[in-house]
Every structure is written in C-alpha cells, then in structure tokens.
Image (cartoon, grey):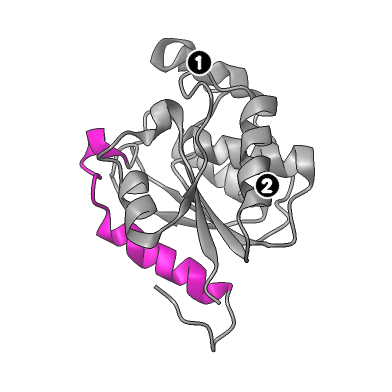
Amino acid sequence: MTPTLVIVPGLGDSGPDHWQTRWTQQFGAARVRQDDPETPTPGAWAARLQQVIEATPSDLVLVGHSCGVLTIVHWARLYGGNERVKGALLVSPTDAEQSDMANLAPAVLRLAPVPLDPLPFPALVVVSGNDPYVSFERAQTFAEAWGAEFITAGEAGHINVASGHGEWPEGEVLLSEVLHAWTPPEITRF
C-alpha cells in the first residue's frame, strides 16, 4: 500500500493556488487544518498534526512547507514521532530565530526556538538559495541536526505562489524520490 501524504501547511493554510493545495487534491492527501492558520503556536499546531496522524490510517509521509516544517519538528519533539510516519519532505523551513523575522513575519516568532533534535524518520529538506525566511547556511544546519538529506532548489525564493510555485513539477519529482526511498520496491508509487 502506498503511504498516504499528510500535507502540513504554513501560515495562511498555504492558500488555494499553492502547490500543497494542488497536491492535496491531486494525491488525495490528508491535510492539517489549524484552528488559527495565521497564529502558529508549537503546542496547538503540533497537537492538530497529531490528531490528523491518529485519524489517518496506513503508513504516512509528511509534506511540510515553511511553518509547516516547524510544526513537524515541534511535533516530533513533543510526541516522539509515530511508527506509521515513514518519512517527510520538508520544503523551505522558516527560521523562527532569524534576526529580521519580527519585520518579515512576526507571527513566526512564536515557533522559536526551532527544535534541533534528530527526527525519528527519514527526511529530505529542500531549500532555495534566496529564501528570505531562512538563510542557506541555517537550512543546512537544520538538515544536519534533524538527520535529514539536503537539496537545493536553486534560486527559487520561498517555493510558494509568490515565487512562482503554484504548480511545482520539480517538487513532484522530489516527492517521488521520497516515496521511492522509503517504501518497499513492490509498492506502487505516484
């Protein structure tokens, strides 16, 4: 059985044209919907992810973007993971400790400090060389601390609609690699 995707959006629920929303529809993914998608808090956002994981049968692959990545790492720290979570695609992790975050997106400050504990499942961190919400070096630090693979998407901004990534075919290739890497060879993949 192919793992079920669990989409973990960032601020604003990633919006209707975002690649995460498209993937929710395209792949029949489960989606984490926060009560207040504009005001992240580690405990509440992680608890909602835990609810979705508990309610979604089968093996799971988490797909986080921006503050959704921080939700996943806070969840792993608070809940210790879940044996059915087989991997994660972590795209454009936001640095809640970045010095200018108060000017860029003050709500993100609520997610500081960023957990640097190893994740209890394999993960792939995808970053851009010119993401305003995380430096390339800090994203590398995250990936190393989390025990994740690291890949650059080039100069791709925040890998969201504003940076031209409503559709994100390169992301689908990366998703396929994630699913291929963490599923048995006899499993049907996307």
Residue drawn at x 40%, y 16% is 104
Q: Magenta: predominant secondary structure element?
A: helix
Asked if residue 25 can be seen in this view, the reply is yes
- Of callouts 2 and 1, the N-terminal one: 1
Residue 175 or residue 163, whichever sits in front: 175
Above or below 170: residue 42? above
Numbered label attached to residue 145: 2
Name the residue: 65% across, 26% down.
Answer: 44
Disc 1 residue type?
Ala
> Does residue 150 show up magenta in the picture?
no
User: In the rendered image of this protein, does residue 59 appear above or below residue 133?
Assistant: below
Residue 92 in the image: x percent, y percent? 44, 41
Q: Is residue 153 visible?
A: no
Mark 2 Cα-neighbour bin, 10 Å: few <14, some 14–19, many ≥20: some
Asked if the residue at tag 1 contacts the one at tag 2, i.e. Cβ–Cβ closer than 8 Å, the answer is no
Residue 57 horizontal/vertical position (percent): 63, 61
69 relative position to 19: left or right: right
- Residue 24, how many percent across, how many down? 38, 51
Identify the image quadrant of the N terminus: bottom right
Q: Is residue 133 left or right of residue 17?
A: right
Q: Which residue is outermost to the bottom?
A: 186
Side of 92 relative to 83 (left or right): left
SS of the residue under disc 2: helix
Which one is nearer the viewer's eye here, 168 or 100? 168
Check residue 169 for magenta coloring. Answer: yes
Q: Which residues are magenta?
A: 160-182
Q: Residue at x 60, y 43 (%)?
A: 142
Dividing the picture into quadrants, the one containing residue 51 is top right
Q: Secondary structure at mark 1?
A: helix
Residue topped by disc 1: 107
Q: Give neighbour class at mark 1: few <14, some 14-19, many 20+ (Cα, 10 Å).
A: some
